[in-house]
Amino acid sequence: MVKILYSEEEIARQVQLLAGQISAHYAPLVSISYPLVVLPVLKGAFVFSSDLLRRVTVPLRVEFLRASSYREGTVSGGLELDIPETAFLSGHHLLLLEDIVDTGRTASQILATLKGCGPASLQICALLDKPSRRVAPVEVHFRGFTIADRFVIGYGMDLAERYRELPYVGELEECTF
Ligand code: IMP
Ligand code: MG
């Protein structure tokens, strides 16, 4: 059983709010010839980014990032980041799009790599933020919801690659029979 934490309607309202904040922030900074570069982190951010981007009103370009953490034994290792060679990030305003920022390790490593590309600015937008779990200091500039320390699924987020297709954000309840 899945317990719904944020319904489709609640998410849509929050996504519209975020799109408004992002549009207002970047309107004076970007243009058709100098668009905002939005960087959704695959796979988790694919649903969130497709809903959000259709509501943002400033000119933008999308470049998908793929981050995969590799593990050695039980210790979490580093992060491999694929940035398209043709992405042209230097001098542009970059907005990283995450489904959820948990410990902050993923986002902080991506930020460090993107800083090396010499952007005009670099900010994070996340649907969900779990600040109580933070290990790496990461600031989420545009945040949909703040949640407690719980594992969520749906709206792009998975548990072992399942549940990404759910239209809401939920939590798995233990089966009691
Ligand atoms: P972090 O590096 O610990 O901040 O976690 C980054 C990634 O872990 C997120 O982008 C998600 O893909 C995944 N993650 C963290 N918490 C959850 C959760 O509650 N549900 C599903 N995925 C999660
Ligand atoms: Mg993710």
Image (cartoon, grey):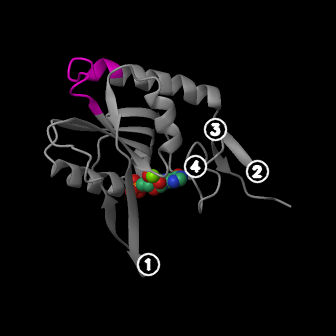
With respect to residue 115, does 10 lie above or below? above
Residue 12 in sight in this render: yes
Disc 1 versus disc 4: distance between alpha carbons? 22 Å
Residue at disc 1, secondary structure: loop
Q: Are marks 3 and 1 in contact (CB under 8 Å)?
A: no
Residue at disc 4, secondary structure: loop
User: Label 3 neighbourhood size at 10 Å, few (<14), some (14-19), many (20+)?
Assistant: many
User: Label 2 neighbourhood size at 10 Å, few (<14), some (14-19), many (20+)?
Assistant: few
Which residue is tagged 4? Answer: 152
Q: Earlier in the sequence, mark 4 or mark 3?
A: 4
Q: Are marks 2 and 1 in contact (CB under 8 Å)?
A: no
- Residue closest to the eye, 22 or 33: 33
Q: Earlier in the sequence, mark 2 or mark 4?
A: 2
Q: Earlier in the sequence, mark 3 or mark 1?
A: 1
Which residue is tagged 3? Answer: 168
Disc 4 versus disc 3: distance between alpha carbons? 10 Å
**Mark closer to the observer (3, 1):** 3
Q: Main secondary structure of the magenta part?
A: loop
Disc 2 versus disc 3: distance between alpha carbons? 13 Å
Residue 16 screen position, x and y as percent: 48, 22
**Residue range of the region highlighted in magenta in the rendering:** 23-36
Q: As shown in the figure, which amino acid type bears the numbered disc 4?
A: Val
Disc 2 versus disc 1: distance between alpha carbons? 29 Å
Q: As shown in the figure, which amino acid type bears the numbered disc 2?
A: Met
Q: As shown in the figure, which amino acid type bears the numbered disc 1?
A: Thr
Which residue is tagged 2? Answer: 1
> Where residue 42 is drawn, which disc sits there?
none
Q: Residue at x 33, y 51 (%)?
A: 107
- Residue closest to the eye, 144 or 121: 121
Q: Residue at x 26, y 46 (%)?
A: 87
Which residue is tagged 1? Answer: 74
